[in-house]
Image (spheres, rainbow, N blue to C red):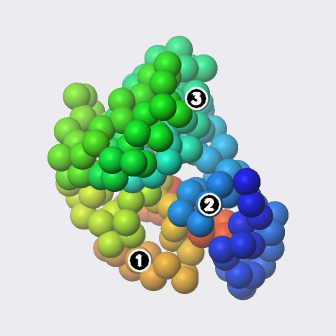
Amino acid sequence: MYLESEWTRPSDYCPSPHHWHAHDGMATEVEVLELVAAFVRGLQPDVVVETGTHRGFAAEAIGRALAANGHGHLYTSEISEVLHAEASERCAGLPVTCLLASSFDLVPPAPIDFAWFDSDTDLRAREFETYLPHMHDRTVVGFHDTAPHHAYRPQLDALGIQLLDLPTPRGVTFGRVR
């Protein structure tokens, strides 16, 4: 594990990235993973969707939270065979289905209660729109990499949902579908 300052410079948005940690330059900050898991514990979702599994750190955190809840299941998608294999191994024994597929091919088996968007930033707004018919007015969504230096935040503003930005090194934004 590394200090997030290996990848993110201090800024007015987040002046102390060295307070956060990450497994690599693409993985979600460890402390943000804990926040996402806390949302899962607090909201008690039955169906969770994640895009961009990467190495499976978020999937593992969400899976552990679902296991602690005693119900719920995560469906997550990854297009890289190597990353999919690592994530599948990391999540073995947890209520997690790791799919080797595009996020646009993942069809949830029931309405989505919580969604975590962490694939390529160019895809996230389109992914949200793709999953919107599978969401309800209690669905909570999270988007990673929303700090100003990622520049895709205007796409999220256009989605028409109320958003809460949190100033983490890479940025994280949560919202509720209404």
Q: Secondary structure at mark 1?
A: loop
Q: Residue at x 24, y 28 (%)?
A: 110
Residue 97 at x, y percent in the picture: 36, 30
**Image marks 2 and 3: residues in contact by CB distance under 8 Å:** no
The residue that disc 1 covers is 152
Q: Residue at x 56, y 57 (%)?
A: 27
Q: Which residue is pictured at 39% across the width and 53% down the height?
A: 52
C-alpha gap between disc 1 and disc 2 = 21 Å
Q: Position of residue 169 (x, y in %)?
A: 66, 70
| Residue indicated by mark 3 | 65
Q: Is residue 109 above or below residue 150?
A: above
* Mark 3 Cα-neighbour bin, 10 Å: few <14, some 14–19, many ≥20: many
Residue 11, placed above or below residue 49: below
Q: Quadrant of the N terminus?
A: bottom right
In this rendering, is residue 91 above or below 14? above
Task: Kindly indicate whether the residue at mark 3 contacts the one at mark 1 (C-beta within 8 angstroms).
Answer: no
The three-letter code of the residue at mark 2 reads Asp
**How many angstroms separate mark 2 from mark 3 (CA)?**
22 Å
- Residue 16 visible, this angle: yes
Relative to 121, is 102 on the left or the right? left
